[in-house]
Amino acid sequence: MAGAQNVKVFGLISDITFHAARCCAEDLNKKDSTLFPNPEIEGMLEFDWDIFIDNKRKELRGETWVFEDKAIVFVNNELIGGPSEFIDWVTDNYSFEEFRPQALYHTLAEEAYKNYQNSKNHDHVFMDISIGDEPVGRLVLELFNDIVPKTCENFRALCTGEKGESPQSEQQLHYENILFHRIVRNGWIQGGDIWKPCCGDGGESIYGPVFEDENFAVPHNKRGILGMANKGRHTNGSQFYITLQPATWMDTKYVAFGQIIEGTATLKKMEEQDIMNERPMKDIKITKCGVVNYEF
């Protein structure tokens, strides 16, 4: 085959097959950098990967409608397929030989995932969700504490419950057992009213009843953006929302401060619940929440 072969590998950073495809592309470049220039490689976290591959299915159609691999490879912008199809392609055409043991890819995947998380110096929190009495999964959220530190600290502390009882309201400053009380179709889901019965007209911050809008530096440019609900300027308390699609009209009205990185299926189950006047017919509850630490 004549001409340079420009390889692009996209995939789930925690998946071993992505790293098998990545290593293959890098090996080809090391062997012949003229034939195989530096490959374009992008590993993504779960939530971003699911959005990316869903968009690719819509863009490419055809066989990609049933594409279930955790990595996808293009050569000269033509789809090759998943990691196994890519390795078969280079084996047949360029006598590539796979030499790494499977256990090594497990180590590479785990190390890459944790290094990616730690490299940003961002806090991460989790929320375990139930609908009715049934556990449905976990949301993992990345907090942009380098951009909006005060807002992120409020949210993090409400996840851990470390502040205990509010001296003003005598309510627990904690998201545990609190409801998502509102679903706006194709807009956002909203929760975080820590004042029982969590109906959406209360809540408070760890700093007092409300605190100021810190900044509007984080855009609402995709699904899964985390932000503070408010009742007007400088009225942030404990209520928050998660976007279900891009919402740029929010950019100068609400303070965004994080994003979902894991929990695609969980969020989908939440947004699909039956509602009446934007209120879920079944309780969507945070059964457990806290901080996630990535250590290797």
Image (spheres, grey):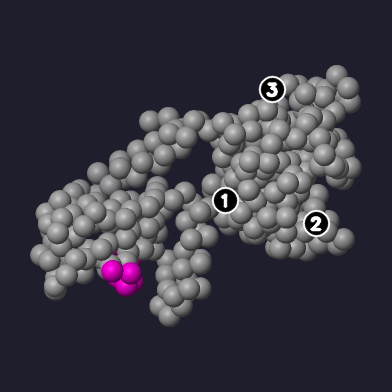
Task: Report, in whole angstroms, how far the alpha carbon at label 3 lies from the one at label 1.
Answer: 25 Å
Residue 72 location (% of width, % of height): 36, 63
Residue matched to label 1: 263
Please name the amino acid that badge 3 sits on: Glu
Image quadrant where one finds the C terminus? top left
Question: With 112 as the anchor, is 286 left or right in this view?
Answer: right
Residue 78 in view: yes
Crowd rating for badge 2 (residues with CA inside 10 Å; few <14, some 14–19, many 20+): many
Question: With 24 as the anchor, is 158 left or right in this view?
Answer: right
Residue 89 location (% of width, % of height): 21, 69
Q: Is residue 119 magenta?
A: no
Q: Quadrant of residue 178?
A: top right
**Residue at 34 percent of width and 45 percent of height:** 109
Residue matched to label 2: 280
Task: Report, in whole angstroms, how far the alpha carbon at label 2 lies from the one at label 3.
Answer: 29 Å
**Residue at 39 percent of width and 56 percent of height:** 11
Residue matched to label 3: 162
Give the SS element for disc 3: loop
